[in-house]
Image: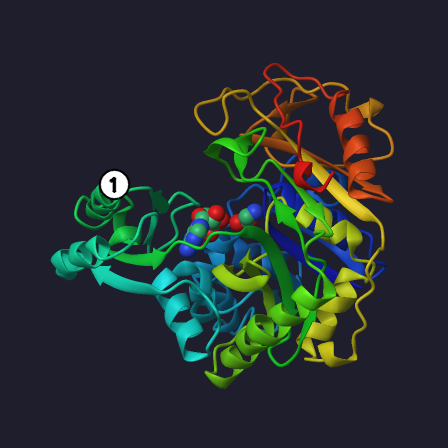
Amino acid sequence: MKNILLLGSGGRECTIAWKLSRSPLCGSFFIAPGNAGTSEYGMNLPFGYNDFAAIKAACIHHKIDILFVGPEEPLVNGVYDFIKNDPETRHIIVVGPSQQGAQLEGSKAFSKKFMERHNIPTAAYREFTTESVEQGISYIKKQEPPVVIKADGLAAGKGVVIAESIDAAVKAFRQMVTFNQFGDAGKKVVIEQFLDGIELSVFAFTDGDNYILLPEAKDYKRALDGDKGPNTGGMGSISPVPFATDDFMQKVIDRIVEPTVKGLKQEGIVYQGFIFFGLISVKGEPFVIEYNCRMGDPETEVVMPRLNNDLVELVLKMEERKFNEVKVEINPKAAGAVMLVSGGYPDAYEKGKVITGLNEVGGSLVFHAGTTTKDGNVVTSGGRVMAITSYGDTLQEALAKSYENAAKVKYDGVFYRKDIGYEFK
Ligand code: AMP
Ligand code: GLY
């Protein structure tokens, strides 16, 4: 039995908590800070996932064997190195890359250069800084719109502008680089070619030498039906993705996944954890839009339910660098998740709304995101409130079940997209 501490508080972490707690190898289980849903699977600890001192104290106090890192921020801040450089905690298995490995997500310029070194297909780009603003502007003027402008660092998904005209591109670039719109994250800016295609998310779990491939997924980022409205953290997800044929996935493996895992190893970048490939298929050819150093949210809500392997066992195999011995077992059923959000999200929304109807949900999995308990009630505490995931023989059957159950959950301002999976009807 292994004692586990999971960092995070979203729908992704609730799903990982559900999955870990089903393992017979899961001993004492803690989540920091967790949400109302994670407390069904383990004990929530009241500190933030960036509080390294509290993480260390909890690891020692609860005799933690495995630290499972959900979100990117602690990884980019170096939680792996913090645990591994301390004699009191270095024996702990950390699921998640070193600070250097997390740069795949933490720095667009780093990931672009990495892809260039390893011939991994991605949009053509140039990198500019506060010292090369004029060069950046003249580069933009040579492009055909739309032009994609990206702040280098973590910007909570808001650091990307797709400018429809050269003027808008110059304006967005200036705002990032000179007016420091994204703080330090925008001191360096990547300008890249716009790729026109359809996106999907592919996940590898690497032990540093080998990798296993998890089911692919697609998330729905825009707030409103028909992919309209502002970008959000994700309004729903599906797995499998119908256009990810064997032929397409083989290209992804040969051109993207293998060169990435080999490249990390070759460069001595310490990486044991998930690699999230944000891909775009341009006429059937895969390109990398971005890397993330963790699982996706809400993709996890459909990927983990389709993974039949014991997740704790996989973590132990990761530590032994024996993923070459693992056979990934994937549930052939489709999974579809619908995200219930707070009214107004992703703009201003109210919190503290009492959630009812959860007991009436049947035949679906409920993964909490922005929820907490207050006075014996489950109440909303974030923009994305919970994901409802269902299985089905087809995606549409899975989604129909999720929608049937979504309608039973009530709180003031409840909102969700009604068309998740619409392209695949
Ligand atoms: P990123 O933060 O790099 O994932 O970008 C956020 C979103 O912007 C992506 O999910 C895409 O929808 C879009 N995007 C980013 N880069 C490109 C690109 N080169 N071409 C087209 N769309 C892009
Ligand atoms: N669903 C996209 C992400 O997790 O970044």
The residue positioned 80% from the left and 64% from the top of the image is 1
The residue positioned 52% from the left and 61% from the top of the image is 293
- Residue 395: image location, x then y, percent: 78, 42
Total numbered labels = 1
Q: Quadrant of residue 250?
A: bottom right
- Residue 174: image location, x then y, percent: 19, 46
- Examine the rendering and report whether any part of residue 51 can be seen: no
Q: Look at mark 1 in the image and give the residue it sits on.
A: 168
Q: Nearer the viewer, residue 128 or 255?
A: 255
Q: Quadrant of the C terminus?
A: top right
Q: Is residue 395 above or below residue 253?
A: above
| Residue, far top | 412
The residue positioned 76% from the left and 47% from the top of the image is 18
- Secondary structure of the residue carrying tag 1 is helix
Is 88 positioned to the left or the right of 139 in the image? Answer: right
Is 47 positioned to the left or the right of 330 in the image? Answer: left
Q: Nearer the viewer, residue 23 or 284?
A: 284
Q: Nearer the viewer, residue 369 or 244?
A: 244
Q: Is residue 256 above or below residue 419?
A: below
- Residue 50: image location, x then y, percent: 46, 51
The residue positioned 73% from the left and 18% from the top of the image is 356
- Residue 88: image location, x then y, percent: 55, 70
- Examine the rendering and report whether any part of residue 35 can be seen: yes
Q: Is residue 75 above or below residue 255?
A: above
- By what rule are the colours in the image chosen? rainbow
Q: Quadrant of residue 384?
A: top right
Is 291 positioned to the left or the right of 357 in the image? Answer: left
Given the image, on which type of amino acid does mark 1 rest?
A: Ala
**Callout 1: 10 Å neighbours few (<14), some, many (20+)?**
some
Q: Quadrant of residue 341?
A: top right
